[in-house]
Amino acid sequence: ARQCGGCQLQAMAYSQQLEFKRNKVKNNLKRIGGFQEIEVLPVIGMEHPWRYRNKTQVPFGMDKTGNIVAGFYAGRTHNIIDHEDCLLAPEINRKIIETIKNYMNQYKIKPYDEKSQQGIVRHVLIRQGYATGEIMVCLVINRKSLPKAEQLVEQLKQIPGMTSISYNINCENTNVILGETVVTLYGPGYITDFIGTIQYQISPQSFFQVNPIQTEKLYETALKYAGLTGNEIVWDLYCGIGTITLFLAQKAKMVYGVEIVEPAIQDARKNAEINQIQNAEFYVGRAENILPEKYKKEQIKADVIVVDPPRKGCEQTLLETILQMQPKRIVYVSCDSATLARDLKYLCKEQYQIEKIQPVDMFPESVHVETVVLLSKLNTKQHIEINLDMDELDLTDAEKKATYQEIKDYVLEHSGLKVSSLYIAQVKQKCGIIERENYNKPKSEDAKQPQCPPDKEKAIKEALKHFGMI
Ligand code: SAH
């Protein structure tokens, strides 16, 4: 673990890891978000926090003595450390890597060398469906085709659960693992897995959450927080292959998913189709462009908005649009509690308040933590309503000392007389404390205006004196 750097918390007891993560979220909300006394729920952890990853990308290389090595990069380097097993990955990976190494040795197929850019096999991508056990192997190669591919397929096929074998072409001098083209050697080109009752087809390039057990808990929390009854219009921003979208669609009237990566949206549409979900629609583009466009041009509304942005969080312009659309609830799913805190601070300036903060441990042994936050729109009960009497508007300094209502109350209390705003205005005018035009005056010059009787005038003057206005 020390050489790899991926499992930063491996030396900590799991219960302590969960406390560490809860504190991390709490501290970020406090220091960056300015939320002082806020309750962060205990982190939802795993019963067995090992072998949870459904996806592994193993770099291949050669050591100084010419042996093929496959394992992980030493922390912050591109030096490959050979290893037989990773305790976060399925055990079957050992067998798969061993089979590929044997094939490479047998047919003298060289691993890729980053310095000279020679050699063939760069990485092996392995995915395993959690519910289905289906396995996908994809070799990333520095060639247009894979030599002795049939022989490799023959050997890999022997492994139980092997469903899809392919290679991906990446001839670039780059750190990016996958190239654009995938050639299928065996099987349908994808594996199938389930989260809850929803079925997903996953191809080598698809983004799919890596911890399926915790993903279900995460999505269930998001769905619960969305509080759907079947009548809502919901937006799922940063939807990837539509995983959360399809979860929400089960309980919403209509769900709109927005995602920047086009192939992900193609997967999302296909996943909606295979699950026979008709109330989900997907748009390709930036959430911060699509949402304002749909809201301003097409007046599409939102009862609930779910966001699940990458680590950098949401663009401020998107948050502005969300505030304008005034959904009843906002569900923020975050993989970085620092940017989460920044965005919550913006959303909670006036109209929204935090209801619940639920961290979920998607990556045991690492420092990472996912958080689901429910925000609700402040309802009118919590607004202050102010009735402004027309008379109270446009006041001069002397007038400001007491309102018309205060004068009326004072007069009633001290003389038992009821006086109108008109009489107060007339007395004020007499005393020289109304400098503006009196709008209580009748519209026409000849119209008769009731004049304040002397007893009332006296009582009003006393009130004006009392309030220090004359
Ligand atoms: N909700 C999905 C994916 C979350 S990952 C799931 O749970 O599986 C975040 C996603 O946001 C990625 O798929 C990424 O491609 C996408 N993304 C990044 N920037 C974006 C932007 N500006 N607008 C829309 N999507 C974006």
Image (cartoon, rainbow, N blue to C red):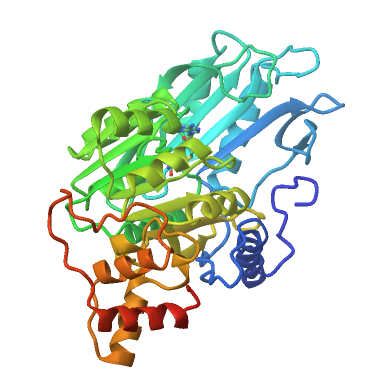
In the rendered image, residue 221, in percent from the top left (x then y), is placed at: 39, 60
Q: Is residue 204 above or below residue 26?
A: above
From the viewer's perspective, tell me whether residue 392 is left or right of residue 138.
Answer: left
Residue 28 on image: x %, y %:
64, 59
Is residue 193 visible to the viewer in this orientation of the structure?
no
Q: Is residue 344 left or right of residue 294?
A: right
Q: Residue extending furthest left?
A: 447
Q: Nearer the viewer, residue 317 or 178?
A: 317
| Vertical comparison of 324 with 284: above or below | below
User: Which residue is painted at 60% across and 17% down in the image?
Assistant: 141
Left or right: 223, with 116 as reference point: left
Report if residue 358 is visible in the image: yes
Quarter of the image where one finds residue 279: top left
| Nearest the eye: 387 or 199 | 387
Q: Place residue 219 in its image quadrant.
A: bottom left
| Residue in the image at 58% along x and 58% along y | 50
Q: Seen from this angle, which residue lies furthest top?
A: 144
**Picture mark count:** 0
Percent across and percent down for residue 142 are: 63, 13
Front residue of 310/106: it is: 310
Q: Relative to residue 158, is residue 368 depicted above or below?
A: below
- 463 lies above or below 107: below
Q: Please indicate whether residue 147 sits to the left or right of residue 275 in the image.
A: right
Please tell me which residue is depicted at 78% across the width and 30% down the height of the picture: 78
